[in-house]
Amino acid sequence: MTDVRQLPEAFLLKMQKLLGEEFGQYLESFKEEWKPGLRVNTLKLSPKELAELVPWNLEPVPWADNGFYYDGTLDGEVLRPSKHPAYYAGLYYLQEPSAMTPAAMLPVVPGDRVLDLCAAPGGKSTELASKLKGRGMLVSNDISYSRARALLKNLELAGAANICVTSEAPEKLAGVWPEFFDKILVDAPCSGEGMFRRDEDMVKDWNEKGPEYYVPIQRQILSQAAAMLRPGGYMLYSTCTFSVEEDEGNVAYVLEEFPQMQLCCLDLDKVPGACGGFGLPGCMRLFPHRLKGEGHFLALMRKKGGDDGGKEILPPMDPGTARKRVRAVEKEKELDAFLRQSGAEWDYGRIVIHQDNVYYLPEGLAWNLPLRFLRTGLFLGELKKGRFEPSQALAMSMKAGQFPNTVSFPAGDNRVLRYLKGETISLEGDEGPVKGWCLAAMEGFPLGWAKGMGMSLKNKYYPGWRWQ
């Protein structure tokens, strides 16, 4: 927690002018502990199912149907949700409650083409993927390659399959995908004033790079995002700062520079305690003294046109390309057999084998685009001299009970942790014998692959994810 005495004087004067009579309440909020939260991954289970699985108390976050505050202690002991096996099963994402609002307010529906332009570390992207329900396409981008790698892990842990992860400047993406996306989220880099209470390092950063540093960057990002939005599509702009220049000022800039963009009024009743924008009605602001969360700003805009409600119909895949891909998969006998026995339905025309890596492309994604991809669709696995080894990402994308050859352990079974640590697992009683590739699971929820060796499982859990 940040001591209010650490706050820069220039910031305090600005906030006093902005909040008026509420300024004292804002300062008092620094004496309160910030409220940690988690968001249930509805790609895998319902909030009710998670509540029955984890040991801590969950209190609903009013503005997110699948968001919860959690009590950080149980019987006097500090809880670490990041060290529960359910976290390793991708059943929830740890997220500050106010940060749940952007993805909640962007009206994504299954089948949309969605862009999360500044996506790392992935809290908002994982929720967007949940809202797509495996249909359409989610492009998650971060200009920082190292941050994009963390983004990729979180998306794969969540079991998101219809994804692309890129690390590009927005203008590069706009050159490839003009007016392509139905929904775009721009959670822009900002001066972070809304996080001052929670993170004192943000105060130090503000002293070095304040709002005047970020405004030009944000406007460049927003301009490229507007160019990638299809007519009739929606773009949500969000920050975690209170700066009017970075918030309402940037929205006004977009509306002036791009006359085809119009502001849509966000429903303040959906977020109890939220208030409207300063000088720009229709926006939404969150303050820590008004609700159980940190500071945030949101504005929803729509590009005019497309009033028929229809989307651009993508041209069908070239039949020759589709046939070539189908033949390539069928030629790999072990791959073909694995996919046919996996319990899932696959469109072989969307499977690409590239340098012995096998990918399942999202609907409408062209291959060999001139972009720096970290992932093009679901990484299915690798071919090694005719053998197929399924990937960790494929395991996490499986639904509970989907893969026929699954060995599931109770949550309290010590073999769950031993599996996550990379150990060989012994089976008991009627759990075996097991032969060949099998899915290791906790309470039915996939954790990763193993090779059945009769009454033992040879561990194939991805080494980079192991329990430390």
Image (tube, helix red, strand yellow):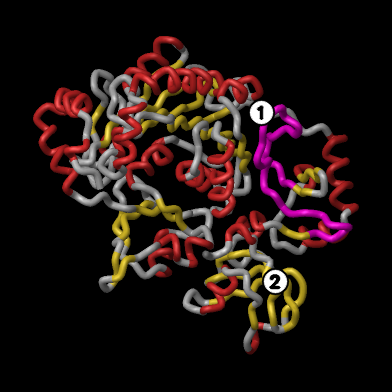
Other-residue count near label 2 (Cα within 10 Å), few / some / many at <14 / 14–19 / ≥20 = some
Q: Which residues are magenta?
A: 359-388
Q: Of label 2 and label 1, which has the lower sequence position?
A: 1
In the image: residue 371, left or right of residue 73: right
Q: Amino acid at mark 2?
A: Asn
Q: Quadrant of residue 54?
A: bottom left
45 shown above or below 249:
below
CA distance for labels 2 and 1 = 39 Å
User: Which residue corresponds to mark 2?
Assistant: 405
Q: Secondary structure at mark 2?
A: loop
Observer able to see residue 299: yes
Q: 452 and 283: which one is in front?
A: 452
User: Which residue corresponds to mark 1?
Assistant: 313
Observer able to see residue 307: no
167 shown above or below 79:
above
Q: Amino acid at mark 1?
A: Ile
Q: Secondary structure at mark 1?
A: loop
